[in-house]
Image (tube, helix red, strand yellow):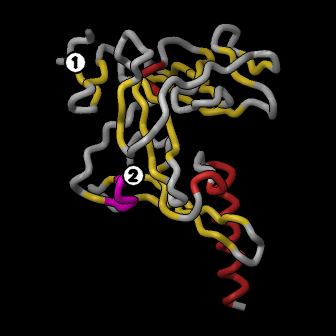
Amino acid sequence: MANKICIAFGLVLALTCQVYCAVDCNTTGAGRIAEPTDNTCTQYTFCVFDSNNNNYLSYNYTCPTNSFFNPNTAQCSSNYVCNITSANSICTSDGFIADPSSTDCTSYIECVNISGTFVTTNYTCPATTFFNPSTTLCELEYTCPTPTFTCTAAGRFTNNADSTCQTYFMCVLATNGTYVQYQYTCPNSSVFNPTTRVCTTSYTCP
């Protein structure tokens, strides 16, 4: 009976994460992967391959207090500095905006101003449609711009196509040897420093 309860509980955890987690274990493979929608650097997804069903199970975890998940070592560490940009920082008014972490234009963010603070909700476009930031709609005929950057190493890198220096790419090494690429936007009034690889107000964009 106890074994049945444990199995059922494990399945609930897996299904819950598959619904709410942004990590696609089929893409990243087995291992611990940083949760791309988490702006606190404390959450990660543990992907486990289930050989019996020939698919991946995903479990969501949170690092211990005062520690952050380091995507380079795939471990929680008190020495890691979190520089992920919050989606709240790109909300300037109520409405829908493109998800800066999406490289295929399939997700978007709803911004709602509640008592002076923006609350954000992430959405995914229906299959075969893409989010058009001009119309703020998911469209069949919209062509998603091809990323001009390709990850070759783990870390944060300059978006050379951005003349404002406000966006950058984050590359995460997957267990299958490939890199998963995310695009982020620095908070308002700050820009990405290619030397320190963090968002700062002291760097002057060329």
Q: Residue furthest left?
A: 202
| Res 201 label | 1
Up/down of 49 relative to 32, above or below: below
Q: Secondary structure at mark 2?
A: loop
Up/down of 19 relative to 159, above or below: below
Q: Residue at x 55, y 29 (%)?
A: 120
Up/down of 9 relative to 14, above or below: below
Disc nearer the start of the sequence (1/2) = 2
**Where residue 33 sits: x, y (%)?**
49, 55
For this rendering, which residue is in front, 44 or 112?
Answer: 44
**Where residue 133 sits: x, y (%)?**
63, 14
Q: Residue at x 20, y 17 (%)?
A: 203
Left or right: residue 36 compared with residue 132: left
For this rendering, which residue is in front, 138 or 128?
Answer: 128
| Res 71 label | 2
In the image, which residues are magenta? 69-76
Left or right: residue 147 compared with residue 19: left
Instruction: Calculate the distance from the C-alpha at mark 1 to the C-alpha at mark 2.
Output: 25 Å
Q: Tell me which amino acid carries mark 2.
A: Pro
**Where residue 34 sits: x, y (%)?**
46, 51
**Where residue 93 sits: x, y (%)?**
52, 12
For this rendering, which residue is in front, 166 or 66?
Answer: 166
Q: Tell me which amino acid carries mark 1.
A: Thr
| Viewport quadrant of the C terminus | top left
Q: Residue at x 61, y 15 (%)?
A: 95
